[in-house]
Image (tube, grey):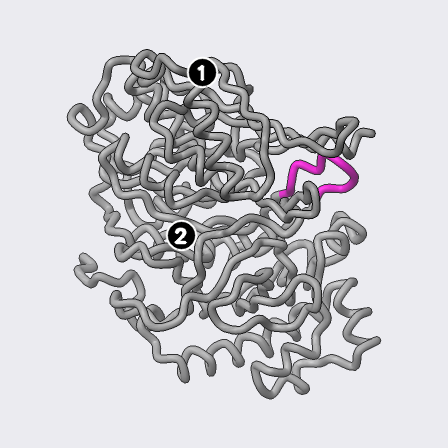
């Protein structure tokens, strides 16, 4: 029977706070019991005298210590696996460029729950089983590929598993298959739009695209607006974390005023990363997550290092799940120059204001004889460079904008489009050469 509701799961999505918190408590007790069968939590719970019968309110979660990425790596590969290894049917992991990667295992139940959450997200922004969905994420250990694939299939959409890279082939698929929706990291979405223009194709008039699902890397509102304007689509922010499953654990609705965090499956806290105490509602802090509907490897109070805030008030869409703001960045992404705390997104926000610039940029922090220096390399757009002959004035304008934003004067270098290397998946934006000295 066709679902004509504006909600994928109306009962869950519109559940009032009291009922939602009762469901969370019920699932938290079960999750603590499940987690106690893993080698790591079994030992921790014995030391801290923690058991399901001692979880009588959501506040009792505070008695459980935080779990960190370092602990995942120190207990590599299976130290957090709950129950029997026979129940695990899939493994995802981080790149692990230094030391052990983080490994996350999934049971059949976990994959089913995850696919349902992604379908819920996609349905929330208006996608239906009549859509043609193209996924530009890799289908390996990165969760963005298979996560959206199974979610789109659950939704009933025709899926195009194009995977990452080969932009001209992506465009051919979009044109030939009549793609209506795309999942891409924001930096690649803009690169795709730029390639359309360079090929002389107007994506607004010559494709059937209506929707972009963007996430996996921090991005500014300016970047989102550029995607929407260049492609003639609505672009919706997504938040996911491999340790919690992957994409689809928080998503914007059509109001685009914050991402609804699916609290039937997760408890979200926001803490001060220094004091580890909860911040006031509306204040930025580090997000901490507890899984409530996972069986193979449920993590409790996991420190994500992602910085965001709760958005106060209710959303007009009718959902009562808490909303979080777009990610400001990661607490470990912040760099300090001349005593000033700086996030890469502050720089991106200013660069996106210039139509003369393309999407590629690189921030390099390097030591000099007079102190640390920030060098911002940014590509010129082939669409606009011919219309702006005075590059020196452009360079000075960008420098002033960045100084006003970050309170430190950077050295701006304008380079030709295609100069800065691109990577599949998340864009690499910062090189800190001080760490090599």
Give the percent coordinates (x, y) of residue 124. Answer: 29, 56
Q: Give the residue at x 27% y 41%.
A: 211
Disc 1, SS: loop
Q: Which quadrant of the figure has residue 10?
A: bottom left
Disc 2, SS: helix
Q: Give the residue at x 41% y 64%.
A: 323
Rendered view: 122 above or below 301: above
Give the percent coordinates (x, y) of residue 130. Answer: 20, 43
The residue lying toward the viewer, choosing from 93 and 223, is: 223
Query: Residue 417: which numbered mark, if any?
Result: 1
Query: Residue 118: which numbered mark, if any?
Result: 2
Task: Indicate which disc, 1 or 2, sits on the residue closer to the N terminus.
Answer: 2
Secondary structure, magenta segment, majority class: loop
Q: How many labels sit on residues? A: 2
Q: Give the residue at x 65% y 47%.
A: 340
* Residue 98 belongs to the span the image colors magenta: yes
């Amino acid at each position: 029977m066709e679902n004509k509701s504006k909600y994928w799961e109306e009962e869950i999505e519109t559940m009032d706070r009291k009922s939602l918190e009762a469901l969370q408590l019920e699932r938290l007790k079960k999750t603590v019991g499940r987690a106690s069968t893993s080698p790591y939590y079994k030992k921790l719970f014995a030391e801290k005298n923690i058991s399901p019968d001692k979880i009588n309110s959501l506040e009792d979660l505070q008695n459980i210590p935080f779990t960190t990425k370092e602990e995942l790596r120190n207990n590599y590969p299976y130290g957090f696996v709950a129950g029997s290894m026979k129940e695990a049917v899939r493994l995802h992991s981080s790149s692990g460029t230094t030391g052990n990667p983080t490994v996350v295992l999934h049971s059949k139940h976990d994959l089913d729950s995850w696919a349902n959450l992604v379908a819920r997200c996609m349905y929330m922004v208006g996608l239906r089983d009549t859509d043609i969905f193209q996924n530009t994420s890799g289908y390996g250990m990165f969760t963005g590929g298979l996560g959206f694939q199974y979610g789109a299939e659950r939704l009933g959409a025709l899926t195009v598993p194009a995977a990452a890279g080969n932009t001209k082939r992506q465009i051919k698929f979009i044109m030939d298959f009549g793609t209506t929706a795309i999942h891409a990291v924001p930096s690649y979405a803009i690169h795709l739009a730029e390639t359309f223009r360079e090929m002389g194709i107007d994506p607004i008039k010559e494709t059937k695209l209506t929707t972009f699902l963007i996430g996996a890397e921090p991005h500014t509102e300016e970047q989102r607006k550029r995607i929407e304007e260049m492609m003639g689509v609505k672009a919706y922010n997504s938040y996911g974390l491999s340790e919690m499953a992957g994409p689809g654990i928080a998503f914007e609705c059509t109001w685009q005023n914050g991402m609804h965090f699916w609290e039937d499956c997760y408890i979200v806290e926001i803490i001060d990363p220094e004091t580890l105490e909860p911040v006031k509602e509306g204040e930025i802090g580090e997000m901490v997550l507890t899984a409530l509907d996972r069986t193979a490897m449920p993590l409790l109070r996991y420190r994500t290092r992602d910085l965001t805030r709760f958005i106060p008030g209710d959303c007009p869409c009718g959902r009562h799940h808490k909303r979080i703001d777009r990610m400001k960045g990661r607490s470990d992404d912040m760099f300090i120059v001349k005593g000033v705390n700086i996030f890469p997104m502050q720089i991106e926000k200013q660069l996106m204001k210039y139509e003369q610039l393309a999407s590629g940029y690189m921030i390099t922090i390097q030591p000099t004889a007079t102190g640390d220096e920030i060098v911002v390399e940014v590509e010129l757009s082939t669409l606009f460079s011919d219309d702006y002959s005075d590059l020196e004035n452009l360079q000075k304008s960008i420098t002033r904008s960045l100084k006003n934003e970050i309170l430190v004067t950077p050295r701006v270098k304008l380079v030709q489009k295609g100069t800065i290397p691109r990577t599949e998946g998340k864009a690499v934006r910062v090189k800190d050469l001080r760490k090599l000295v």
